[in-house]
Image: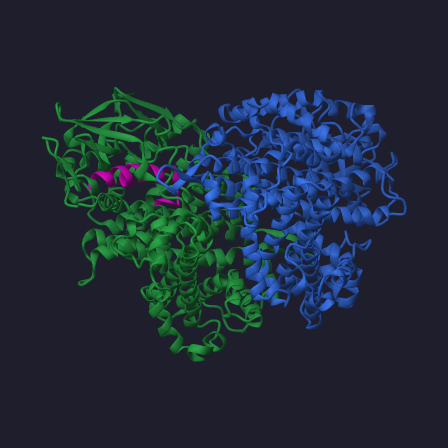
Chain colours: A green, B blue
Amino acid sequence: MATDTVLPTPTGSVPPTVDVPALTALLGGRYAEVRRRVRDQLVAHAQVLVDAEEMTRAEFRDRVRDVVVEMAGTGQTGMGFPTDYGGGGDIGASLAAFETLALGDLSVLVKVGVQFGLFGGAVLQLGTERHHEKYLADIVSGRLMGCFAMTETGHGSNVQALGTVATYDLATQEFVVTSTRSDAWKDYIGNAAAHGEMAVVFAQLVVGGESKGVHALLVPIRVDGEPAPGVRIEDDGLKMGLNGVDNGRLWFDGVRVPREALLNRFADVTPEGLYVSDIDNPDKRFFTMLGTLVQGRVCVGGAGINASKVAITIATKYALRRRQFEATDDTEEELLLDYGLHQRRLFPLLARTYALHFAQEVVAAQVHDIFSGTLQPGADPDLARRELESRAAGTKALGTWHATRTIQECREACGGAGYLAENRFAALKADTDVFTTFEGDNHVLLQLVAKGLLTAYSSEFEEMDQFDMVRFVAGLAVETVIEKTSVHKLFERLKDVLPGGPDGWDQEAGLLDPDYQLAMYRFREEHMISGVARRLKRGIDQGMNPATVFSRVQDHVIGAARAHMERLVLEAFVGKVRAMPDGDNKVALGLLCDLHALSGIESDRAWFMEHGRLTSTRSKAISREIGDLCRRVRPLADDLVDGLGVPVAMLRSPELVG
Amino acid sequence: MATDTVLPTPTGSVPPTVDVPALTALLGGRYAEVRRRVRDQLVAHAQVLVDAEEMTRAEFRDRVRDVVVEMAGTGQTGMGFPTDYGGGGDIGASLAAFETLALGDLSVLVKVGVQFGLFGGAVLQLGTERHHEKYLADIVSGRLMGCFAMTETGHGSNVQALGTVATYDLATQEFVVTSTRSDAWKDYIGNAAAHGEMAVVFAQLVVGGESKGVHALLVPIRVDGEPAPGVRIEDDGLKMGLNGVDNGRLWFDGVRVPREALLNRFADVTPEGLYVSDIDNPDKRFFTMLGTLVQGRVCVGGAGINASKVAITIATKYALRRRQFEATDDTEEELLLDYGLHQRRLFPLLARTYALHFAQEVVAAQVHDIFSGTLQPGADPDLARRELESRAAGTKALGTWHATRTIQECREACGGAGYLAENRFAALKADTDVFTTFEGDNHVLLQLVAKGLLTAYSSEFEEMDQFDMVRFVAGLAVETVIEKTSVHKLFERLKDVLPGGPDGWDQEAGLLDPDYQLAMYRFREEHMISGVARRLKRGIDQGMNPATVFSRVQDHVIGAARAHMERLVLEAFVGKVRAMPDGDNKVALGLLCDLHALSGIESDRAWFMEHGRLTSTRSKAISREIGDLCRRVRPLADDLVDGLGVPVAMLRSPELVG
């Protein structure tokens, strides 16, 4: 076999035999069965992938709505809702089900997200029994379609500055909802252009002439298919992708809703016009409301990671069939996957897909525990919530960037064939492209992560803007910032156990020792956080204003957040492999974990060299080791992508993988 | 102004005032007037950008054909053809006109490329008077639409292995064209699915029972709108983008064409069935034919660079309007472009867009000189042709990757708004995505570049496959390989003139000294080429077969080619700035040139550190310098994108830039 000539196993050892079903079960985790059922649903609805290409936009929107409602009928889209309202009562299951949907058509995924995650989630989390009783059963079944109307044009991420106002009218005991500024319409609102009957509208609440900050209300936007009185609706028109989702714009002009329309879990207005809330601080109240919506971000991150699985599966299988330019002997050309460069293009992405899957599993479990009240005894639920918010933000950023990068690389790796719509890449690229900027722009999300790190998730951290944070950090000693981080202790502990000890660990430990890899990631994180703290202090000490300081340090801020997230991802992967029983699957995943860890060091090796943690000799050794690891992954590649569990019907690509 | 608070000019000096029209004229170069006329045409046809979204696929294909034919009527698509046939007789003008079309709808661009570049170009370059007289006037006017049928499925880049056969039938003096293998249909052929009446078909020529290798023939594929007898045509269906181009598949089953259908510039078959050619070596003959088609690659590279201009212009202008999350004071939020990170995301891409524009100008001038016979006296035309082939391949790879990366980054930098079709990014992304893999996969093209470097463009280099090259290089001394490269002498010369001399130039020269920057690029190139040569030799010496050696060294091969191309790009930019008269525009472009040069060093700083040419201190200084340069570019940004000369009508994006 040509492969054997080209790729002798470096050590001469026998490659492990991957048990594919066991691997899929491992990835499925606690919700393997839920995922299996969703995959079956996707296969049953596989035609929607073709319909996306062949139907008009209006037809396809309706088609997607129908699929979503059908799926709702199976219970698979409502697993996170209370059983009293037809839900499954299992938040973890709902996250697993949702991310698995990302193996199929992504308009279906996003429509599910809009309806059950954003709209239904807001009613569940921000509303109280009066809303639940009245609406949840219809929402869970898909009978009542709705919108989540937060985003406005003109202000981007600054939700607190939005321009829709809801004024309490004491005389009628109603709220009057109005879009006050010409640039403050609600935009990119899913379900708005065609199917939504109701919207959760975020607006500045005005009671007794006084602004109480942003709150959410339930506002009917359509009656018998026509815009409700006072509501103007515009279609966002053609988008790059996700054209099965009917995004639109909403304007409100004196729309009256009863007092009870206010989603009043955290604040209420009495009939007499008294504003009441258990949370005194308005910023804290606002961020408490927002915090309940964290599941959306977790969902998008998981979707990105799962969409990547489709791309890497197609590209790997294609490279196992396709013969390229030159022939080793006269009769046969080499398989594409036998080329060193091709392995280097695909295998680190495959390894990272596994890594992110396991990291996503951790954050999803945290969501489950916090929202189900199953935190470990003694854990501080507020601190856990803040840490979750940060981790969800960071995982979403990494997962969605990974999708963009992986899908692009895989599309290029399939050459011209990758350009035909039937081969999935067109839809994958176009549909996932917005993931990096919706549910929070990735850069803004990483700033949130950094803020959490630098303030040690202090109870005020959510209310701080970037400039408050600059001032806050500048007021602390750098050592204080560092010592409060969890990475500090983790790193201190590792240095001692590694060969070479605290001084020589980075020289003497083996490259394939997970503790060495973890130590490198932890060193980088700790060092970057202290670097940011030092720069922020210095800027303020030099008399620069916080905006200037922040602008100049921003890339370091983002860098520190990335380093933190990369450390968490590696820990998740290493932890998962360590927990596996000995056997060939553990060996195989161990290879991927090494490949992931070392690729991460290699891609940032300049930084490690600049900071004295990598000699140029060792840096080159890491690059060679990655080449070796790729050659060892090569014979396992087909099984490793099969382990990801993407149904064949979701790959399409008859010419590429058939 | 908020900007001033945030961004004091670092040195306190007054920023230069950019003369925008002069800058556009500089970019236009010798063909500024041609480019201006094409831009006017694009504006006149701006509606096609909207039609791309609103029409059905079939309607839009016809619409694009109509626009192409209308443009042909203005003479702007035929500038490269002889005046005798209605052309403009100016190859350089035709390249400038073509790449300027990339500011508009890219289906129009690609349809123009298929019709006038590929189809018309093949008839012109591979045919003789009998074909020119009969067809060229109709081709130039767009009356005869045609295809360039080279690519087949199943074999990718290996054109010499294609499975279409043209057998000479002595009895009837005809060629019989047949698709022999089930996997050897012609695929992704532009103009095939709807509009083409004729195709230049590449096939194995069989004469007297003997295979003569790949040749091209003119084959009618449609008669009165129906497939010609023996021709089967299939539509490639929906693609990721470029859906105004009717790509399709072609099968031939015993299609008979007269003997004169053979494009016989380099080889002919006499009526008596005698095969005659002035070029004895069949490989050489084949590559001579292919070499005449180099303009296609030059065109695609230029198109990628120009499409990038649209994206960077929109994103920059958006960031100059958009206010982001936080406010410096209570009344106003910061402009997006005031953020350090945002500058770092956009400005190096802007600088690189300029750099690649000037590099493209150089390669286009070489095409012009070689194909117009205006080479400098004494130049070896064959060597020049081989060097051009390599440079065209490399510029295409860099230009198209730049497009993919720039468009993606700019789309993300525009947030959710970047996702709406009316804001151009959807089309830009989808349409340009195939640029990296058509007209030669970029990785394969860079391997071609490396082969040229390693063999010093020896006269046999075109015929060598990668494994011949491995053997060839392994047979030389590494010093011989190096000394034959042009970079060797260039680098030796520079080291002496820099402060610090041959030993300390990399320490003592200023970071903003273009000679220092050039020396870094040249050092890297020379070192990478010798590294590859050494590795290839070592592999062969250790008894590995050439395939294994190549697979293991492949990433270094690609790296060396990239280093070579980056050096050429920087030289083009530095040369252009040096040649400018003193003044503010020179200062402004000098900033961009520094930013481009240092960003290139920064992104590969790990390599420079590993190879002893960058201390970690200096590496960090480079990163700081890049931050400073970004802050100095900030006040010029609007003018610098205006200088790129993208008509406002091509930006669309009313909400983003209006």
Residue A259 drawn at (x, y percent)? 15, 30
In the image, is residue A106 part of the stretch drawn in magenta? Answer: yes
In the image, is residue A145 part of the stretch drawn in magenta? Answer: no
- Left or right of A169 in this view: B352: right
Residue stretch in magenta:
A101-124
For the image, the number of numbered tags is 0
Residue B529 drawn at (x, y percent)? 70, 61
Farthest residue to the left: give it. A272
| Nearer the observer, A657 or A616 | A616
Q: Quadrant of residue B561?
A: bottom right
Q: Residue at x 71, y 72 (%)?
A: B541
Q: Residue at x 30, y 39 (%)?
A: A160
Q: Is residue B191 visible?
A: no
Whether A576 is drawn above or below B394: the answer is below
Q: Is residue B167 visible?
A: yes
| Nearer the observer, B117 or B367 | B367
- Left or right of B294 in this view: A25: left
Residue B136 drawn at (x, y percent)? 78, 26
Q: Quadrant of residue A84?
A: top left
Whether A29 is drawn above or below B393: the answer is below
| Nearer the observer, A541 or B580 | A541
Q: Main secondary structure of the magenta part?
A: helix
| Nearer the observer, A523 or B431 | A523
Residue A56 drawn at (x, y percent)? 43, 26
Farthest residue to the bottom: give it. A500
Whether A372 is drawn above or below B507: the answer is above
Q: Quadrant of residue A290?
A: top left
